[in-house]
Amino acid sequence: MQQLELFPEDIRIERVDPEANMYRFYRLRLMPDLFGGVSLLREWGRIGTQGRHRIELFEDAGRAADAMAALYRAKQKRGYRLAG
């Protein structure tokens, strides 16, 4: 299992299973917004496509980082691993 840096702002993970024809990606990014808060951008889909996205707004970077870490752990349990 690869180790994340202490406070990552961008995480890309993948789940690849050729036997099940499964080639998925999930990306989590923290970005400052215009109002002093932080946005958590979540992108997911099949590798090689643009995929879908969702933006969640948080009041501060700590809460956004906690949400990102929780999502990362949940995806790890489903078989996602850090991409290259």
Image: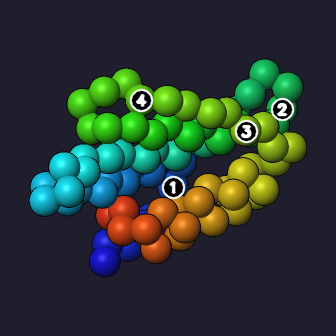
Q: Decide which of 53, 22 is in the foreground and name it.
A: 22
Q: CA distance from mark 1 to mark 3?
A: 17 Å
Residue at the (51%, 55%) spot, across then down: 8
Please name the residue that numbered disc 3 is placed on: 56
Check disc 3: other Cα within 10 Å, few if <14, some if 14-19, many if 20+: few
Residue at the (59%, 60%) spot, across then down: 71
- The disc, 2 or 4, on the residue closer to the chain's N-terminal end is 2
Determine whether the residue tagged by mark 3 lies in a helix, strand or loop: strand
Determine whether the residue tagged by mark 1 lies in a helix, strand or loop: loop
Please name the residue that numbered disc 4 is placed on: 51
Name the disc covering residue 8, or none.
1
Coordinates of residue 78 in the picture (x, y in percent): 43, 68
User: Residue 58's quadrant in the figure?
Assistant: top right
Coordinates of residue 17 in the picture (x, y in percent): 20, 59
On screen, residue 51 above or below 82: above
Name the disc covering residue 23, or none.
none
Mark 4: which amino acid?
Gly
- The disc, 1 or 3, on the residue closer to the chain's N-terminal end is 1
Coordinates of residue 45 in the picture (x, y in percent): 39, 37
| Camera-nearest label, 3 or 2 | 3
Q: Decide which of 57, 3 is in the foreground and name it.
A: 57
Mark 3: which amino acid?
Glu
Q: CA distance from mark 3 to mark 2?
A: 14 Å
Please name the residue that numbered disc 2 is placed on: 36
